[in-house]
Image (cartoon, coloured by chain):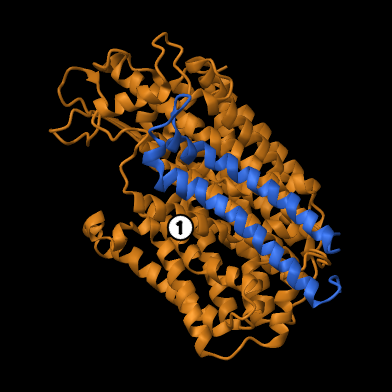
Amino acid sequence: MDVQTLTFIIVGLSFALYIGIAIWARAGSTNEFYVAGGGVPPLANGMATAADWMSAASFISMAGIISFAGYDGGVYLMGWTGGYVLLALCLAPYLRKFGKFTVPDFIGDRYYSQAARVVAILCAIFICFTYIAGQMRGVGVVFSRFLEVDIETGVYIGMVIVFFYAVLGGMKGITYTQVAQYCVLVFAYLVPAIFISMMMTGHFFPQTGFGATLSDGSGQFVLDKLDGLSTELGFAQYTEGSKSMIDVFAITGALMVGTAGLPHVIVRFFTVPRVKDTRISAAWTLVFIAIVYTTAPAVASFARVNMIDTINGKDGSGTEYAEAPAWVKNWERTGLITFNDKNGDGKMFYSAGKIDDPNSANEVKVDRDIMVLANPEIADLPAWVVALVAAGGIAAALSTTAGLLLVISTSVSHDLLKRTLKPDISDKQELLAARLAAMIAIVISAYFGINPPGFVASVVAFAFGLAAASFFPAIIMGIFSKKMNKEGAIAGMVTGITFTAAYIIYFKFVSPELNAPAHWLFGISPEGIGLVGMIVNFVVAGIVLKLTAETPVEIQEMVEGIRNPKGSSAAHAH
Amino acid sequence: MAFKDEEQAKAYWAENLALLFKLLAIWFVVSFGFGILLVDVLNEIRFFGFKLGFWFSQQGAIYTFVALIFVYVFKMNTLDKKYGVDE
């Protein structure tokens, strides 16, 4: 059977599984729609959260980015997992005890202010949309390559599937569907990685494989070979990277605090019955995330060696284009690989520099997003592994999209309608509003999937920066400081957001030509500026606190209450 | 009320913060410390086929994070029992 037929079968089977689960777990009441009645076991919740957390970006792009950036790519590994530690230790147990559905609920109640609630709702919706646009695009890319349909059809198919289990199933459907999706995506990620590790180093575990010697008889370590190749071809050493230390520090920090404030992940911890369960379910989640995140850098190294060896040939003089393997031609058709035979010798050659620059020997441009998808083909693995990776990529994109859609619909129906605009809304109307909001959100995100704004990557940096500079400090102070009042929190959020947004907009949109280390504040790139924004937020909040009235006694008692793990309300209580 | 008196609540919170502080110190050292600030020094050391600083940044920090959260869960459950606020 060919790759395409196998992809149809494997992706089709996985879809049948997800839809089946969604129908089986169809939600009956508002509470079930939001949080599965508080009855999800911690281990299952851990897997679902991991699937929620690992987006198409983690699955498809991350190893590719590391493959091209080497050591610098570590910011994503440390940033995303380290942020998770902050979430598990400093936020999740307390927010669970607080016992409301959403992050804006917490901000609004803790800071006794509708203004703060509305700011939080807008931030949550903005962050979620930014993410979703990328996810829908990811689904489209996978479909267009493996099913040989155009990207629009790919996005439409994804839209219908998401609609079924997110809108009809609600949270309970999502939780169990995401458990299934985690299993599919982790299997799809590990199988090719283990295959390749065995082939290249004889190690079963990719995690140790990329620190071992190559089994091609040279006795050379994988990373040493990679460092050698990188230097030879004019790149920075793979294990050293090229970013400055302060920038690596700031980006890691911004990603950590930014991800700790992600609303669609936080809401996941409201689905377990007790504070104790929140803690252990957070621990399981990180185990499930770590399985993929420790494999990713190994995949990155192997893919890099394989790619360079295939394009430049074993002797490093280039491979005849006419004899190029099928994956080069396949991806060339999608426009994600470009070959420009500058010296006209009919051979492909890959090195540093741009392919249209006559001073560089480089003739091949490889889009980093294809590394994970193309990896099994580059390593010449069986067709069913290639098909499996397609199913995994789709599982990753769909699971995250569904979680994000749920936050958007909750923000609209619960935070905006019930808590702010129309408090007397009935349970039934609220559920209807939630479903309508999810539907509208799907349509809008499909639009962005088909017509992606040219600056998706910039917008993602924006979302992390905003979350780092706004949500994170407000929640941390809300839990760990009884004194922090609404004036301080709002002033902190507003200055933090304004500072971060202004910096990013200036370098990304107003004067992109100045976007270079020489012009950056302290040498920190727009990707890392959220860390500075967070510090600004904390400082401003502290100063304003000194100048304004004290927090009311009942709020101080509420903070006492969330610090005591005993007696969580049921997950559905208002 | 779960705590016997306010003293107990205060003592519980103080122990909770002390634990958090210790765990976050380790969190900082393995990632920002070993993986970033000290990376050049540690890269002089070989750990199998890895440079040690590089290994911390792409592997070691993550393993430590997983261990940290499990230690947290275990210690917090013990603490809850000690103060009679376990469920």
Of the 4 image quadrants, the one containing the N terminus of chain A is top right
**Front-most of residues A108 and A370:** A108
Pointer 1: residues within 10 angstroms few (<14), some, or many (20+)?
Answer: many
Place of residue B72 in the rendered image (x, y in percent of width and height, measured from the top left): 69, 52
Which chain did the image draw in orange? A
Can the viewer see residue A369? Answer: no
Q: Chain of mark 1?
A: A
The residue located at (78%, 75%) in the rendering is B7
Place of residue A117 in the rendered image (x, y in percent of width and height, measured from the top left): 59, 77
Report the number of numbered marks: 1
Vertical position of residue A4 compared to residue A141: above or below:
above
Can the viewer see residue A52? Answer: yes
Q: Is residue A56 left or right of residue A285?
A: left
The residue located at (54%, 32%) in the rendering is A295
Question: In the structure shown, which secondary structural element does the residue marked by tag 1 occupy?
Answer: helix
The residue located at (60%, 82%) in the rendering is A114
Vertical position of residue A140 compared to residue A229: above or below:
below
| Residue reaching furthest to the top | A217
| Residue that mark 1 sits on | A254
Of the 4 image quadrants, the one containing the C terminus of chain A is bottom right
Determine the image quadrant of residue A427: bottom right
The residue located at (13%, 33%) in the rendering is A358
**Front-most of residues A58 and A431:** A58
Q: Colour of chain B?
A: blue
Vertical position of residue A312 compared to residue A30: above or below:
above
Q: Is residue A416 left or right of residue B13?
A: left
Place of residue B11 in the rendered image (x, y in percent of width and height, measured from the top left): 75, 69
Place of residue A94 in the rendered image (x, y in percent of width and height, measured from the top left): 70, 65
Q: Amino acid at mark 1?
A: Ala
